[in-house]
Amino acid sequence: MASPQIDVNEIVATLEQIRQRGHSAHTVFRDWVNLVLFALQDRDDPYLEIVDDYRERGDMDHPRGQRSVDLFATAFGQLQERMAATDADVLGAVYEEYGMSSDAFGQYFTPHSVCETMAEIAGVGGESDTDDRQTVLDPACGSGRTLLVAGRKQPDALFVGQDKDPLCARMTALNCCFLNLDAYIIQGDSLTVEFQRAWQTSYSSLGGSVRELDDEAVEELREWVTDAFENTVEAEDQPSPTQGTDTGAEDQASPVATSVPSEQASLGAFEGSD
């Protein structure tokens, strides 16, 4: 069930209008997430492929503002409003609430209150024994809820999230973009060090941006994360009186340089879909 402090009924009702036109709830939610992600990256071809699926069902016969593509844009605007009001994982809350009617969703995310406690126990946002930039890693990030909590406490850190579920990885990438965090989000099994795909989100004064990394950049990211983990293990094997919470990842530059023009996450991302 969605977290009680987050009202997502308006968003769910908008998506439900699309579902009632002959689509499954999971397909509607997945397509919505992909449309937002493609729009924010200016990736027209995959965006239009999804739009075409709804056009083929006679959806364009609905009046302007009531077509499925319009309703997807409306849901995006409602999502932004709730994010601005709460700074919480609204996207994950929609997934939980909307998915109650379908077994296809199958994910249950850590409650916000537990994420807050976990961040406090990990010392996120607290004093550090080093001036180096801190790295916050969640190897099973789900919708990115713990990273969002950590991002509010320490927004200048570098965030790394990984999940083997493709939809969860995309949701986390969007959440980190919306909260304007520097982050790498990986699709793949963290236990087997599997990196199938990855996205980079970048901070700017105008708002967050997101891009999917190419294969070469994904491999560089994999090597960087693996090396950082090995350095952490070595440091833990050699404790010292001055040992702090530094993970060792800060000794290396982030693997992929930020080269994305800043684009504020807004309804303008949906323009040109007619």
Image (cartoon, rainbow, N blue to C red):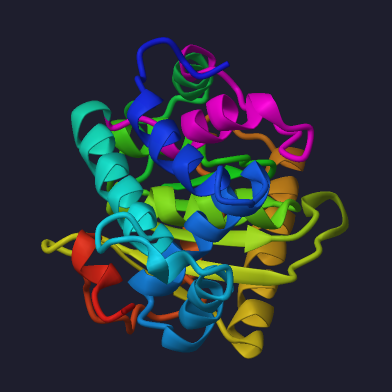
From the top left corner, tell me how far across and down residue 146 is, in percent.
50, 32
- Write the residue at 81% across / 64% down: 194
Residue 31 inside the magenta-drawn segment: no
- Write the residue at 34% across / 70% down: 40
From the top left corner, tell me how far across and down residue 42 is, in percent.
35, 81
82 vs 174, left or right, is left
Image quarter in which the N terminus is found: top right
Near-viewer residue (241 or 121): 121
162 vs 44, left or right, is right
Near-viewer residue (52 or 245): 52
Near-viewer residue (125 or 100): 100
- Write the residue at 40% across / 81% down: 257
From the top left corner, tell me how far across and down residue 149 is, in percent.
40, 30
Depicted 161 relative to depicted 59: above or below: above
Residue 97 inside the magenta-drawn segment: yes
From the top left corner, tell me how far across and down residue 251 is, in percent.
49, 63
Depicted 17 relative to depicted 50: above or below: above
27 vs 184, left or right, is right
Depicted 27 relative to depicted 154: above or below: below
As drawn, the residue found furthest toward the left would be 205
Residue 13 in view in this figure: yes
114 vs 83, left or right, is right
As drawn, the residue found furthest toward the front would be 61
Depicted 60 relative to depicted 219: above or below: above
Magenta segment: 87-114
- Write the residue at 43% across / 83% down: 43
Q: Locate residue 102: give its quadrant.
A: top right
